[in-house]
Amino acid sequence: MKSQATYAANPSFEQSFRAHEEKNKPQKVPLPPFGFKEYMIQKGNQVNKALDEAVPLQHPRKIHEAMRYSLLAGGKRVRPILCIASCELVGGDEELAMPTACALEMIHTMSLIHDDLPCMDNDDLRRGMPTSHKVFGEDTAVLAGDALLALAFEHVASNTKNVSSDRVVQALAELGSAVGSKGLVAGQVVDIESEGKEVSLSTLEYIHVHKTAKLLEAAVVCGAIMGGADATSVERLRKYARSIGLLFQVVDDILDMTKSSEELGKTAGKDLTSDKATYPKLIGIDEAKKFAAQLTDQANQELGFYDPVKAAPLYHLASYIASRQN
Ligand code: GRG
């Protein structure tokens, strides 16, 4: 076997090794120029308006108040904006995706309400405000989550216009599978079971992929379906979404360790106090950051198949997810 010294003394090997490394390192794609901040504000406002209209304050007042309290409490609106951006990339317009975009935010919000309950993570702070059960009581918080989940599916089925019923059904199936016992619920169950135990990297990945990435994947895939994408494009965008989905949670793990509750709008340092496995805990913060960079590169590579101008929002969304501060 050759020693390292032999390699170092052999310039032709060193040259070919470096050339190989250079060729195989993840390609950095320069971000296409794009007014991303304005885009996020404009799309976020449109989503907020649609959500406000989707859940009017009606009888019985308390449950609708609770639904609106959590849904309209702020939040970055990453899932609905991903859905719209994906729809627009494949040639659809915003209205085709808006009911699904709202449904994604309803599902995401219900998962936060239930996650904060005393029987789950038992948290007091969410989106910078007291959690639903602190304000409305545990019974109403459970029901507000249930109602938002049911409304999500009703909203897509009743309000999607100018999309074939085949595509609407396909998107509903995608949403259902992302949420249920093969999706978010699966991730949450394994997360709870794993608390306080030694967790392998593959179990941690399972938890993160199911608890967090599945809904982000559904956001991008449903947007593409509503926008009229063909099967190849849907699967290509699914790959992009899988990378940014896991990226989202790896970054969340890092933020939990490095930011304050005030900065995050939710209790910081929770993973440590509740003895949860995270990427920084298992592989260290530097490796977690490297992994995040790799996932960003992987996501960008999938976008290489599209016109960079049209794909600019999705490139910038990946970069935003990687570098977000809350
Ligand atoms: C879905 C039926 C059903 C039940 C819920 C409680 C539960 C099962 C799952 C937990 C899912 C969960 C809370 C995952 C964490 C995902 C995550 C990183 C949330 C933070 O998302 P951000 O940063 O939050 O997008 P904002 O507030 O900006 O929307």
Image (cartoon, rainbow, N blue to C red):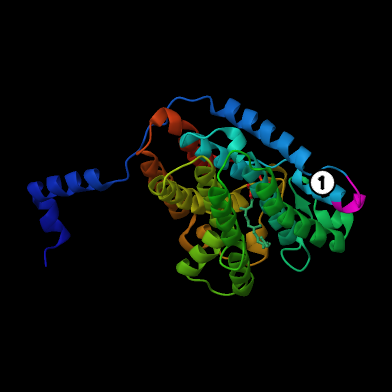
Query: Ligand 1, what quadrant?
Result: bottom right
How crowded pointer 1 is (Cα within 10 Å; few <14, some 14-19, many 20+) is rated as: some
Left or right of 6? Residue 195 is: right
Determine the residue positioned at 83% across, 42% down: 56
Query: Which of the 4 image quarters holds residue 274?
Result: bottom right
- How many numbered callouts? 1
Q: Is mark 1 within 8 Å of ligand 1?
A: no
Query: Which of the 4 image quarters holds residue 74?
Result: top right
Q: Which residue is mark 1?
A: 69
Whether residue 290 appears in this view of the structure is no
Left or right of 44? Residue 226 is: left
x%, y% of residue 5?
14, 57
Query: Which of the 4 image quarters holds residue 22?
Result: top left
x%, y% of residue 185?
63, 66
Highlighted magenta segment, given as a residue range: 58-63
Determine the residue positioned at 67% across, 32% down: 46
Q: Quadrant of the N terminus?
A: bottom left
Examine the structure image and report whether residue 69 is included in the region drawn in magenta: no
Badge 1 amino acid? Tyr
Q: Is residue 232 above or below residue 122?
A: above
Q: Secondary structure at mark 1?
A: helix
Whether residue 102 appears in this view of the structure is yes
User: Relative to the observer, which residue lies in front, 53 or 195?
Assistant: 53
Q: Quadrant of the C terminus?
A: top right
Q: Is residue 170 above or below residue 32?
A: below
x%, y% of residue 80?
61, 42
Determine the residue positioned at 71% across, 60% down: 115
Left or right of 120? Residue 243 is: left
x%, y% of residue 78?
60, 42
